[in-house]
Amino acid sequence: MPSYSIGQAARLLRVSPETVRRWADGGRLPMGRDGSGNRVIDGVGLARFARARAVEDERGTVGGGPPTSVRNAFTGIVTALTVDDVVAQVEIQAGPHRVVSLVTREAVEELDLSVGVTVTARVKSTSVHVDRS
């Protein structure tokens, strides 16, 4: 049976290793110890947990947030913020993806955004274009 380190599980679940530790310590994610005493997650338990999170995400309730129809969510860190009188440009690094969004200055203030803050960019598009490489 395959097993995963905390770091490997975090990469697969697209969260921080600390989040994986908290889930394990809270009993949400089953974790054991290998022969060397290192904390590991068995593959079956991790698969079950990932599937349950995907179902939560489909319902739009991951993280206790309000239900949403948006399916493309990119959690990342604000890397740049340019604010003028009316609009703001927010740059987010979400894993290997750079997401840039134009929002109102008021939204930046209400969300208390600044460089270094963790955010989730939700993308819903009426049109997607695919080009052949």
Image (spheres, grey):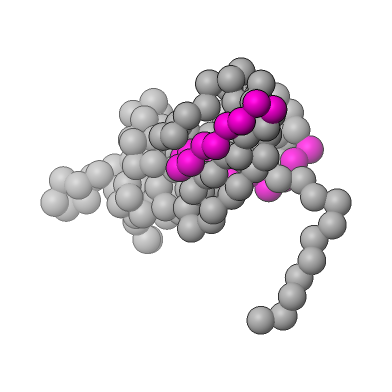
Identify the residue shown where x is 45% and y is 42%.
Answer: 79
Q: Is residue 126 above or below residue 26?
A: below
- In the image shown, does 127 or 17 lie closer to the viewer? 127
Residue 77 versus residue 71: which sits nearer the camera?
Answer: 77
Q: Is residue 24 left or right of residue 85?
A: left
**Residue at position x 44%, y 34% from top?**
115
Q: Main secondary structure of the magenta part?
A: strand
Residue depicted at 39% across the width and 26% down the height = 26
Q: Which residues are magenta?
A: 69-86
Evaluate whether residue 15 shows in this view: yes
Residue at the front extreme, as displayed: 85
Q: Residue furthest bottom?
A: 133
Q: Quadrant of the N terminus?
A: bottom left
Q: Nearer the viewer, residue 4 or 110?
A: 110
> Residue 60 placed where, x, y %?
70, 34
Residue 62 seen in this snapshot:
no
Among the 4 quarters of the image, the one containing residue 30: top left
Determine if the magenta segment contains residue 60.
no
